[in-house]
Image (tube, rainbow, N blue to C red):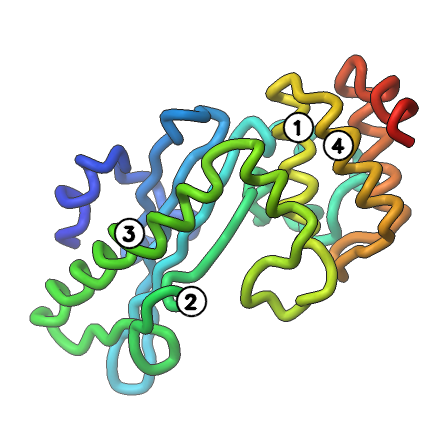
Amino acid sequence: MELAPRLLPGGLQVSRSRSGDDADLRFSGRVPSFPLLTRVIDIYAEPLRDWMGMTAYARVVSAEVGEVIGGLPESAQLKDWADPGAELGLVELAGFDGFVNAGPYGSFALRDESSVAGAVEWVLECLDGPVGGWFSQRDDVTKLLDLAKYPRPRSVDQVNPDSELLRATVVLCLLSDRVADAAGLMGWYLGAGRFSVFDSFERASAFDVALGERFPGYVEARSVIG
């Protein structure tokens, strides 16, 4: 697609898609101000009635968080993290159609080759506008801490915090030597008892214990905060 040369100046490089399908595209680039985070754009094409539909997603991922999570016992992981196909380092996720309407079924219609230029402009419009703003609101630990206690926008569950974001933020704090912040967020989570369908008090408690075994100083910080 024509996107590659347009995105490279923004620090995004072409990466291998998650699916491995040549029809899917992934662009990624480390966040300059916080290299533990990587911005990712995933673009997929799929049949929709009598045309192809293109959908795009913004992700914030951290390979370092993924390494920590991958080393935890199964009892300490979210239920979906036990899936070998899960992206363990996923911190945040949002569909472009949540910001700028793409068309029917939330997809941009690729009816013929002439549609490609419009699709490129739609992606760039999103990146220059609301999606770019979404990324800038998630480019360091402090900003993620501010978001971690709330549901993910447009999520079906609008009551409980997003367990994936919250756990990833705790790990990011520990990797950034912000042990007190990690302990405080985890203490709040266990005390609030507001768990999504992917988490539970038992799994969150096992996560808490496993972090104490992995990171020196965490147990002491948790004992102080409670």
Q: What residue lies at 52% left-to-right and 33% top-to-bottom?
A: 62
Please name the residue that numbered disc 1 is placed on.
Answer: 68
Alpha carbons under labels 2 and 3: distance apart = 13 Å
Q: Position of residue 162 (x, y in %)?
A: 66, 53
Q: Is residue 114 above or below residue 24?
A: below
**How would you rate the neighbour count of disc 2 (Cα within 10 Å): few for under 14, some for 14-19, many for 20 or more?**
some
Q: Is residue 51 above or below residue 5?
A: below
Q: Tell which of 206 and 168 is nearer to you.
A: 168
- Disc 4 residue type? Leu
Alpha carbons under labels 1 and 3: distance apart = 30 Å
Which of the 4 image quarters holds residue 73? top right
Alpha carbons under labels 1 and 4: distance apart = 7 Å
Alpha carbons under labels 2 and 1: distance apart = 30 Å
Please name the residue that numbered disc 4 is placed on.
Answer: 72
Q: Is residue 224 left or right of residue 58?
A: right
The residue tagged with tag 3: helix, strand or loop? helix
